[in-house]
Image (cartoon, coloured by chain):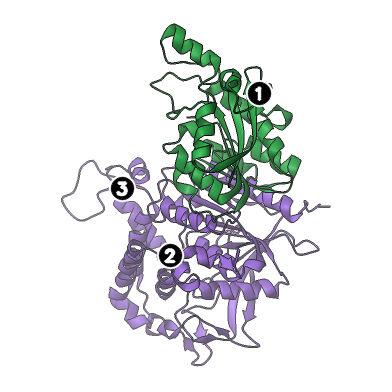
Amino acid sequence: MSPLDGNQAADRSASGNGIRTDLKLIAEMVEPGSRVLDVGCGDGALLAFLSRRKGVDGRGIELSMDGVHQCVAQGLPVIQGDAETDLKDYPPGAFDYVILSQTLQAMREPRTVLETMTRIGRRAIVSVPNFGYWRIRAQLLLTGRMPVTEKLGYQWWETPNIHFCTIKDFVALAGEMGLRIERCLIVNGAGRVTGHAHSGLANLLGEQGVFMLRRD
Amino acid sequence: MPGHRVTLGVERPMRLDSGAELGHFEVAYQTYGALNADRSNAILICHALTGDHYVLDRHPVTGKPGWWEMLVGPGKPVDTDRYFVICSNVIGGCMGSTGPKETDPATGKPYGLGFPVITIGDMVRAQKLLVEHLGIQQLFCVIGGSMGGMQVLQWAVAYPESVFAAVPIATAARHSAQNIAFHEVGRQAIMADPDWAGGNYLLEGTRPHRGLAVARMAAHITYLSEPALHRKFGRNLQNRQTVTYGFDADFQVESYLRHQGITFVERFDANSYLYITRAMDYFDLAADYGGGTLSNAFRKDGKGTPVRFCLASFSSDWLFPTSESRAIVHALNAVAANVSFVEIRTDKGHDSFLLDEPEFHQVIRGFLEGCAEHRGLTRVSWP
């Protein structure tokens, strides 16, 4: 089950310029020719994009068999595995970037995953949905029910997203873990980049945040 | 018999892992497709325990089609229009390469148990000499399943600079206690047959057919999954309405296994079976190359292996389960190697790598195409 709803999963399969907004933002953060590990790489849309457009040495790890088959069948080096058990084998600094897009909230131990990512990668790039987004706040406030949005389309009893956070929460955790936020992009509902991570407004207007982290 | 044969170890004998030396030995092999001008499109196929080099040819003894026609051939994932495919019979084998049934030049009699014990490393050493004989510096890919997969791993570890890509399928970096146990059952069955004659059956004019057939029957069960056996035979009775209250082959599965045993002895040498199973038992990459740690085997001069790997396992394979492939993947991750890994969902057991598994074939095709792109291989144009 993808942490995002069906429409979003389909978005991710679009190739070339058609890749999902946050993937495009992530791709822009990656230096050409670098070594990249895409954790939860899905069907390989970002990896394929990075390999072809930026000449990166890309690897992937993906839980779903379907995703892995699609990746390997198009020549992408991807292994079937679980981010929470299969990342620890990589040596420190094995990659320039370790990418985790829209999946941190589905991890059993997000903090451990972040720790491992920033150990095996010189930098980690993480995109997280913002539970502090005004539409989500409004839904909870007005209806008293668990929010179900276009981007997070699961009912509470079926969602794989077990560790939601707000942008404020994420920034706080990064600080606590001694991770420096080198770059941060806040994306609003229209897919446009807006605001600064530390502003209260970002936590209200941002639908998701894309963070580039490194260990101090 | 179709195919080629070359005498190797002529200038100097090949030193085996046991310390023994093997000089002037034969390697039987087959090739398909054409080697390109810069000799960069060669794929070596490594066969499994009871396989041989007749990947695409009708088998000279059984008349059956080539054993990997599903995967290899013109337009197939291992495309012979594009790649130069080599497969050799392992040393210790019985389909043309030097093994226990061939004549020992020192005595003029069949080697029998006088043949030195060989290892997976020795098989690959012989293949390396063959590949050099063919004038190939670096293989584009080495691919094989089961024992063939062990040889692939051995190639990648022993000669990383001579392998661009490696595809170990349904295999393990070491033979497990359970694997060794099954092999021992097979060997004991052969050696318990009086016609084995202490290994001298060729001189005695006997053949340990009963023992070898039992060995094959036991092994064959390990190649299949329980669901596959059940689907194929269930508890169905063989040409009868009711059980006979005797020890005839009442059940279809018995009849099938007996058939497997009987047909096997026509094409396989009992002593070869002893030697090759032993070679698999001795296989342990971590112990031999990594000081007990598998990832160290994939490290050389402080750097991770340059070989690109694609591992595949099959969900219902209990002989070489997915966990064995995953252990190899973890070791490769520890040296940040370039590795792909797929578990194919199927209920057909260990033998799946020989069967029609479209998903598996797509994976191999995609991986090879990706590697070909990186290796700068373009299609061979045909007139």
Report the residue marked by disc 2: B174
Tell me what residue is drawn at x 27 percent, y 48 percent: B251
Tell me what residue is drawn at x 43 percent, y 51 percent: B322
- Extreme-right residue of the structure: B383
Q: Are marks 1 and 2 in contact (CB under 8 Å)?
A: no
Q: Foreground residue, A201 or B258? A: A201
Q: Are marks 2 and 3 in contact (CB under 8 Å)?
A: no
Q: Foreground residue, A25 or B314? A: A25
- Identify residue type, mark 1: Gly
Could one spot residue A62 in this view of the protein? Answer: yes
Q: Which chain carries label 1?
A: A
Q: What element carries label 3?
A: helix
* Quadrant of the image occupied by residue B275: bottom left
Q: Do labels 1 and 2 share a chain?
A: no
Report the residue marked by disc 3: B252
Estimate the x, y position of residue B305 in percent, counting from the top left. 60, 63
Could one spot residue A3 in this view of the protein? Answer: no
Q: Which of marks 2 and 3 is in front?
A: 2
Chain with colour green in the figure: A
Q: Colour of chain B?
A: purple
Estimate the x, y position of residue B280 in percent, counting from the top left. 43, 68
Q: Foreground residue, A122 or B284? A: A122
In three-dimensional space, the C-alpha distance between marks 2 and 3, rounded to whole angstroms, equals 34 Å
Is A54 on the left or on the right of B330, as rendered? Answer: right
Numbered label tally = 3
- Identify residue type, mark 3: Gln
Q: Is mark 1 on a helix, strand or loop?
A: loop
Report the residue marked by disc 1: A195
- Extreme-bottom residue of the structure: B106
Tell me what residue is drawn at x 54 percent, y 33 percent: A171
Tell me what residue is drawn at x 31 percent, y 47 percent: B252
